[in-house]
Image: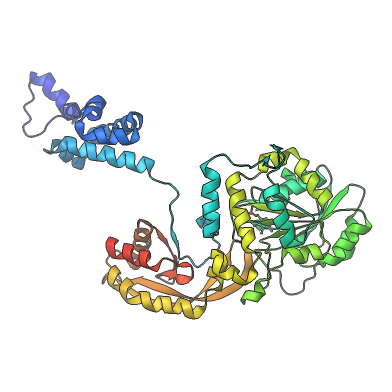
Amino acid sequence: MVELTALCRVRSGVCLVIGIVPVNQKLRSLPSVDRVLNAPELSGLIGQYGAQACKIAAQAELAQLREALQGGDADTEALVSAADFPEAIYAAVRRRVAAEFSASLKPVFNLSGTVVHTNLGRSALPEEAVHAMAMAADGACNLEYDLEAGHRGDRDHHLEATLCELTGAEAATVVNNNAAAVLLVLNTLAAGREVVISRGELVEIGGSFRMPEIMQSANCILREIGTTNRTHLRDYRGAINDKTALLMKVHTSNYEVRGFTNSVAGRDLSELARENGLPFVHDLGSGTLVDLVRYGLPHEPTVNEALAEGVDLVTFSGDKLLGGPQAGIIVGERELVDRVRRNPLKRALRVDKITIAALREVLNLYKDPQRLPSRLPLLADLTRSAAEILALGERLLKPVSEALGPAVEVALRECKSQIGSGALPLERLESTALQITPIASSGGKDAALQQLAGRMRELPRPVIGRIRDGSLLFDLRCLRDEERFLAQLREAM
Ligand SMILES: *Cc1c(COP(=O)(O)O)cnc(C)c1O
């Protein structure tokens, strides 16, 4: 088009091509940024979001139109020639600004079948914790201020006594997550020296947490012993020398070695550590404060059990089976916890007031284990009975089928939920899923399935399921707000 215009000019100075408006002229028909910003139609938008954001959006929108016109895009040409053209630009600028300011973190329905899903933010927090977080965020608070004495205090003070009460530990401190807890403990107790650990426990947790690499980051020398499947007490004993800083055990939280295996009991290791004057550290990973068996769930090692075996320091996550906010908790012997606290890295890894507020509320719920399943969302999800989930499925089957229309088939299907985040990797909980299957279309079944899953992710509150055997499965275990789920399906489909 550009060439054509130039050609006309060279020949006669007059463009004789009728019905085709030259590109330059179309570009000229685009308003200037200032004209867009001064349009009365956008004054409300500028009032709401500010002139700068609107200017950036207008510039981006006009640049995009210019580029499309230069590329000869037919839709854009039609848009620019339409009678309501400036209004179309204003609408596009409005959409751009609104998208720019919309929340990036959105609540979703986690119907993936994994209860503690790291990519979906792990645990939902109890109401009490949500209130406490808002309160802490709202203004100044006594985060590190001793109100009685009127001088500087310690942020651990808000959590330590409760953690000690619940775990039987002498002392406790809290950092950003369990990866940070492990890093901090290793760096404090073993920088430049050797850490003895069984080869079978050199775990990798999703998202690049690998024990050998953490050791390296903590400036420790990894002394791996035994074999992948079998490690004996004599292996630990043989590895101890004058460079040894500590003995370590890591809970193999996300896998299990089965068959001809041997690992050394915590009690024996703690005895060996004591004989040699070394600290013994156990990274529990998930760690729970109550025996889950009392709620009909599989057994996961508790922090109390680890301490009772004679472990000197235990590290565990705040947002795995504990059901709290992201945090890493270190409990154990006072002298060791004090050393951990004095490490300058602690300052870099510390938790903020909002996490402390939430964690305190979650820990308080553990003081009444009997009511815990009804008060802690994670435990409520994990203990939801198969019969209750089936009943929910039966209620949803017909309305969901109606909402989704004739292009899909909806059925109920038994399924198994997993706990997730590496906790109890082999255990599965009986559950029920809505099984949604596209009726074969011309584009192919696979494309239809992907499209269906994509549409579910575009809903105002995106619904995340999993694809299995040609269907989209919505595991109903973690569906709380059944009405909202249905209402948005009815509206959007
Ligand atoms: C999950 C896990 C970690 C990391 O914990 P985050 O809280 O996710 O940082 C460390 N060690 C073990 C054994 C784990 O299972």
Quarter containing the N terminus: top left
431 vs 304: above or below: below
Q: Is residue 435 left or right of residue 292?
A: left
In which quadrant will I find the C terminus? bottom left
Q: Could you say where residue 417 lies in the image, as x and y percent from the top left?
A: 53, 71
Q: Nearer the viewer, residue 431 or 436?
A: 431
Q: Report x, y in % for residue 490.
A: 29, 65
- Locate residue 289, reporting x and y percent: 68, 64
Total number of numbered labels?
Answer: 0
Which one is nearer the viewer's eye here, 392 or 222?
Answer: 392
Residue 232 visible somewhere in the drawing: no
Q: Quadrant of residue 290?
A: bottom right
Residue drawn at the location 23% of the way across and 40% of the way down:
91
* Quadrant position of residue 299: bottom right
Q: Position of residue 257 (x, y in %)?
A: 71, 69
State the residue at coordinates (74%, 44%): 218
Viewer-nearest residue: 442 or 456: 456
